[in-house]
Amino acid sequence: MPPASTDRFFGAPLRRRDVLRVAGAAFATIGIGASVVACSPNGGSAAAGKKVYRFSTEVPVGDTDPLLVGEYNAMILVGLVNEWLVSQDKDGKLIPRLAESWSPSPDGLSWDFALRSGAKFNDGSALTATDVASTFSLLIAPDSGSPAKSTFEGVLSSVETVGDGVVRFKLSRPFGDFPYLLTNANAVVLPAGYQTGSWIDNPIGAGQFILSDYKPGVGANYSKNPHYWNADQILLDGVDITYYSDPQAPILAFQAGEIDHIDPLFPTSDPLSALDAQRYRMVDLGYQRFDGIFLNVTTAPFDDPAVRQAIAWGIDRKAIIDTVYAGYADLGNDTTYFPNYAIRPKGLEQREQNVDEVRRLLSGRNLAFTITTNNKQLAEAVSQQLNAIPGFDVSVEVQTTERYYGEQNSWLTAPLTATNWPWEIPSQFIADIYAKSALFNASHYANPALQNLSFEYDATSEASKRQDLATEIGRIQWEDVPLIVPAFVRSKLLLGPRVQGEFSGKVDYSTGFPFAGITVEG
């Protein structure tokens, strides 16, 4: 994305739905943070002998329009009905959906996507290149209210059809990872002429399911979409979502067999102690997020790189993985390069707790500061580790999610914060949290060299050059350390005994909610 507008939401006011979207990243598998009493909103379609998958989420808030949705639970509500051109699997590999193939122009300034023949919307009408061009034109229009507008701003200039079955995306600058931007939550395909804001009254889409009943605050029921392009692989007759308000209720519902999966990291790092784990199946669905520790480099004492490095060396990452994430994470090293990226920085020393290095960097100074966050477990673990080292006096302020991401914007304004970020492509992290103009730059960090290297990375497809650029980007992140990344958290689901089949990735918008091949018995 370009120098003038590199943040995912840059160029538009920071709306409530935008911050809720980031807050929802902590719940990057459906079922986390869930809320319900055990009841099917329509009285129980499974009782009629149908194969219905059941899970829970919190009550959706904000927009329930595919082009405007920004809160995670609302993304699930609309996402099961809609379809993307491409999605990702658990390793971050792109998977064809409505697009069968794609390729860039020689100069990298356009991408052609060949559409799947015979694709239809859930009302039986044909899905065409015109529909795709129309949808993306709405997303990037000057008056667009979509969070996706900022994803594409400075990258995507226009969209046009090339014959009946090809869509051409014209770019403002070469962007080698452009197809990954199309896994954005709002980048679904709707019919040409679609009126933004009308979806909940007429839930049109080209996805796996049809929204058959929706009761706000209670739940939603879906039936299989017979017109789905991959309908033969959708083995379920439907999906039921129930909304819970008590965070302990999903564990009880899961124990009772009323929902079909639960996240093993929610609501505590050890919910398995309340369950007979032998009855269930644990699945690993790839990397979900990192919980980053952001240090405001414009505020003392964090304006001193030696202080930031001392804090980074004072953290016992392996212990955090064991205690905070129950082992479901891999070591981080203060760069934003996930372990499953094809290209990662080389030659960086892996940081681990090193008290001697902390003493050397602090040079006898005493530091007192507060960790502000909505992530109590991580903050308490980090504070305990640092307080055990002479020179640190660390306190914790745990806020509710509403307050943390609310009007005070504590996650962006407090001197030291701990905030979760979902899996993205490398340049998106530079744009989102390292660029000077980025709305989500909680570290208030600026390094033009880092952004220029990111633009170079986007513009080339040569693996060796990308490797050199990634190594230099990682070196700057590691040395300047405006952001500490202790660990990369994996997406795990504990599946109930009824569930058969394998999810191809974490169950969220980036993977297109991959229910193909999933069924239930009993």
Image: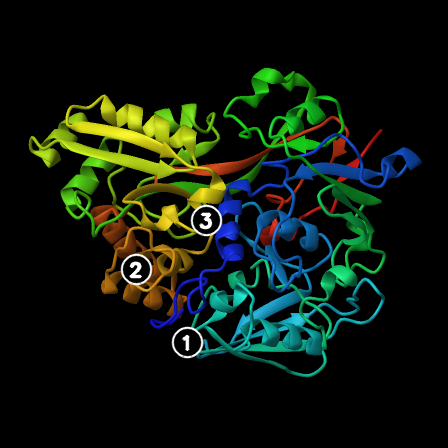
> In the image, is residue 113 above or below residue 50?
below
Picture residue at 35% right of the left edge, 50% below the top: 412
Q: What is the x, y in percent for residue 155?
A: 45, 72
* Mark 3 vs 1: CB contact within 8 A: no
Residue 467, visible in the rendered structure = yes
Residue 236, visible in the rendered structure = no
Picture residue at 62% right of the left edge, 60% below the top: 86
Q: Nearer the viewer, residue 398 or 291?
A: 398
Q: Nearer the viewer, mark 1 or mark 2?
A: 1
Q: Nearer the viewer, residue 2 or 461?
A: 2
Disc assigned to residue 173: 1
Q: Using a 10 Å C-alpha cutoff, classify the residue at mark 3 as few (fewer than 14 neighbours), some (14 to 19) or many (20 or more).
A: some
**Which corner quadrant holds the N terminus?**
bottom left
Q: Is residue 149 left or right of residue 128?
A: left
Q: Is residue 56 left or right of residue 223?
A: left
Residue hosting label 2 = 469
Q: Using a 10 Å C-alpha cutoff, classify the residue at mark 1 as few (fewer than 14 neighbours), some (14 to 19) or many (20 or more).
A: some
Residue hosting label 3 = 406
Alpha carbons under labels 3 and 1: distance apart: 35 Å
Residue 350: image quadrant is top left
| Secondary element type, mark 3 | loop
Q: What is the x, y in percent for residue 372?
A: 34, 38
Q: What is the x, y in percent for residue 209?
A: 78, 53
Picture residue at 74% right of the left edge, 22% below the top: 256
Q: Nearer the viewer, mark 3 or mark 1?
A: 3
* Sequence-first tag of 2 and 3: 3
